[in-house]
């Protein structure tokens, strides 16, 4: 086997297990969010909410920071939101340390040229997820503190996790054991074409930028004025810039992921096999 094939063989089993766990987790997280918030007035129709609901309702000015009485529960969703965000934070923290540990173990137990292969593959495979987890943890922390952001953050998390279900299912099929029916090229091609790509486009290139990001950028202005009055001058602008820069970074990562989703060499090989089987 050449270096690329050897690296692919080494990583298939842990990737299959990781993708299977993430698929289950994303499904559970989406089911939890939808069951808790589907009738809330901030849960938009684009993610299965009521027709009368709008993200504009995230920015009720009676809610402020999570410090006792200052965090008004204006729609009786604070308790459910806290539980949801604690679960999300725990998952992101677990995933962050899992990536760090995986990289360390691969570099520790390989020798010579194999160590160099593992180091290069580890950095290439884990650098983007590491950055994504770090940004996600920071956003979850900010959203947890501020009640308006907490509600919009729940919509954003649900949107991204909904797309992640099909992405992780694709990873499960790609990295399944060679004898598994899940690894059939035709199945992977159909899953990619009719589920993964459409859900990615809808969730990450429509709902995320035009509903979630739009709300954070434009519908939050009155709420930001209240934050400005509660803290030092300029604090609202700093919060606005930090939050929107992080959202733009996640959107940029989505562009990178989408390019890989369309043109990844391993997927192209699978699609070529599917065409040959026809």
Image: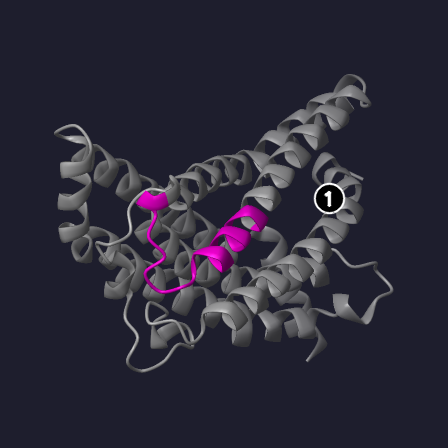
Task: Please give left or right for residue 91 compared with residue 210 in the image.
Answer: right
Q: Quadrant of residue 195?
A: bottom right
Q: Main secondary structure of the magenta part?
A: helix
257 relative to 214 in the view: left or right: right
Looking at the picture, tell me which residue is in the foreground, 179 or 69.
69
Q: Position of residue 158 (x, y in %)?
A: 47, 62
Instruction: Identify the magenta region.
Output: 69-87
Outermost residue on the right side: it is 179
| Residue 232 placement (x, y as % from top left) | 16, 28
| Left or right: 37, with 57 as reference point | right
Q: Residue at 55% across / 47% down in the picture?
A: 86
Name the spot of residue 56 as percent of width and height, x first.
23, 64
Give the residue displayed 87% in from the left and 64% down from the top: 179
Up/down of 243 relative to 16, above or below = above
Q: Residue furthest front?
A: 69
Colour basis? one colour
The residue lying furthest to the top in this view is 112
Where on the picture, by quarter, is residue 237? top left
How many numbered circles does the render carry? 1
Q: Quadrant of the N terminus?
A: top right
Secondary-structure class at tag 1: helix
Residue 31 appears at what percent x and percent y?
Answer: 58, 69
**Residue 77 in magenta?**
yes
Which quadrant of the figure contains the C terminus?
Answer: bottom right
What residue sits right under mark 1 in the picture?
A: 8
Report the residue at 68% width, 74% height from top.
Answer: 187
Mark 1, Cα crowd under 10 Å, few <14 / some 14-19 / many 20+, is: some
Compare residues 269 and 73 and report the one nearer the observer.
Answer: 73
Answer with left or right where residue 197 lies relative to residue 178. left
Is residue 97 part of the magenta span, yes or no? no
The quadrant holding residue 224 is top left
């Amino acid at each position: 086997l050449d270096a690329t094939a050897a690296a692919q063989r080494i990583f298939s089993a842990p990737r299959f297990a990781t993708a299977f766990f993430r698929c289950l987790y994303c499904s559970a997280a989406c089911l939890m969010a939808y069951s808790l918030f589907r009738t809330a007035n901030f849960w938009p129709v684009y993610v299965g909410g009521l027709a009368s609901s709008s993200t504009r309702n995230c920015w009720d000015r009676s809610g402020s920071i999570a410090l006792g009485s200052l965090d008004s529960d204006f729609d009786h969703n604070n308790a459910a939101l806290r539980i949801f965000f604690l679960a999300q934070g725990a998952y992101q923290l677990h995933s962050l340390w899992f990536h760090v540990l995986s990289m360390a173990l691969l570099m520790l137990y390989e020798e010579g040229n194999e160590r160099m292969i593992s180091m290069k593959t580890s950095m290439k495979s884990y650098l983007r997820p590491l950055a994504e987890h770090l940004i996600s943890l920071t956003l979850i922390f900010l959203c947890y503190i501020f009640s308006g952001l907490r509600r919009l953050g729940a919509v954003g998390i649900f949107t991204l996790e909904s797309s992640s279900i099909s992405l992780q299912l694709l990873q499960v099929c790609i990295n399944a054991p060679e004898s598994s029916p899940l690894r059939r090229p035709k199945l992977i091609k159909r899953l990619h074409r009719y589920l993964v790509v459409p859900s990615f486009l809808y969730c990450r290139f429509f709902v995320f930028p035009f509903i979630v990001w739009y709300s954070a950028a434009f519908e939050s202005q009155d709420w930001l004025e209240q934050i400005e009055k509660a803290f030092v001058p300029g604090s609202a602008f700093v919060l606005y810039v930090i939050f929107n820069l992080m959202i733009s970074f996640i959107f940029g990562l989505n562009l990178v992921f989408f390019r890989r989703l369309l043109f990844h060499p391993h997927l192209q090989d699978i699609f070529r096999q599917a065409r040959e089987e026809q």
